[in-house]
Image: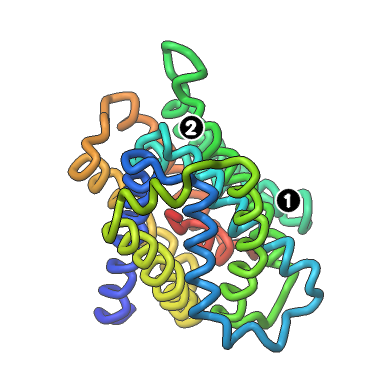
Amino acid sequence: MSLRDLALLIAICLVWGLSNVVSKIVVGQWGVAPLFYTALRFAVVLAVTFPWLLPAPRPIWRILMIGVLMGGGNFALLFMGLQTASPSAAAIVLQLGVPITTLLSVFMLGERIHWRRALGIALTMAGALTVIWHPEGVELSYGLWLIAGATVVGSLGGIMMKQMEGVAPLRFQAWVALASLVPMALGSLLFEHNQWPSAMAAGWPFVGAVAFTALIVSVVGHTAFYGLIQRYEANLIAPLTLMAPLATIAFGVLITHDHFDMRMAIGAALALTGVLIVALRRNHVAPLLLLLREEP
């Protein structure tokens, strides 16, 4: 990998790592409704990528389903979880997306896994459960369970995406945004309140947060990452993308003052080791594992 592309990948991981911290501030500290925040994010993405909507990928029903799963459903659960969960803990639990995608590929795509990848799956799940488990009660880790649900939803969308071919990155993002915007906006109208007052109270920093997560994280970050996947083998990029959760943990400790104790450290070590084992084993869903690694 060239030094320029390595620097680009590092920048992408740092941006993804910062994204969870920004979203935590939006929904956890400023009190912005998560479905409303999700809808605004995809409205901005759609506005930017609208020229790439046509020609529509076929079949349309599949790309719409993928959009809802990988976009609105995934992000809504994540942002709801971040209302109470710390970005550091969320970054570790999000690693469940890798083993879940692998397991779904076995049942839906007929992929086969061997003992090393099975060990990686077990380690990742053990690490995530170590972080989710709270000695004082399940209710205290409710947000992390929502984030675990986000990984399941996103992984299912990723497997469905594997069954589509030839969708350009910007066209894919345009359809994800289109498919996500309407249900997220309706959900916000039906189930949330005081959306605009909370956003107005946050002021221009909220506008900057939406622009950062929509434009820099999604449009620029994802498009650049697609390009790297096209130029290099996934097994080369996979270990380097572990910088993203590590960056989230570092930003979380520094910016939102996340609590990071020995239990969190053990869970992070187990989960990231498991992800590394799974991602380094050659398989047909390796690019999907990486695309699901965005720390939304």
- Quadrant for residue 140, please give it: top left
| Label 2: few (<14), some (14–19) or many (≥20) C-alpha neighbours in 10 Å | many
According to the picture, the residue beneath numbered tag 2 turns out to be: 143
**Amino acid type, label 2:** Gly
Vertical comparison of 103 with 128: above or below: below
Residue 192 numbered tag:
none
Numbered disc 1: secondary structure: helix
Which residue shows up at 20% across the image and 45% down it? 255
* Front tag of 1 and 2: 2
Vertical comparison of 110 with 137: above or below: below
Q: Is residue 48 left or right of residue 55?
A: left
- Residue extending farthest to the left is 254
Which residue shows up at 78% across the image and 54% down it? 108
Q: Is residue 211 left or right of residue 278?
A: left
Q: How far apart are the two marked residues, 1 and 2, measured between alpha carbons? A: 28 Å
Provide residue 74's location: percent of width, then percent of height.
58, 51
Provide residue 175's location: percent of width, then percent of height.
64, 73
According to the picture, the residue beneath numbered tag 1 turns out to be: 106
Q: Quadrant of the C terminus?
A: bottom left
Provide residue 120's location: percent of width, then percent of height.
52, 42
Which one is in front, 196 or 86?
A: 196
Which one is in front, 281 or 205?
A: 205
- Quadrant for residue 19, please give it: bottom left
Which one is in front, 106 or 184?
A: 184
| Label 1: few (<14), some (14–19) or many (≥20) C-alpha neighbours in 10 Å | few
Which residue shows up at 28% across the image and 25% down it? 262
Counting every numbered tag in the picture gives 2
Which residue shows up at 45% across the image and 33% down it? 127
Provide residue 113's location: percent of width, then percent of height.
66, 49
Numbered disc 2: secondary structure: helix
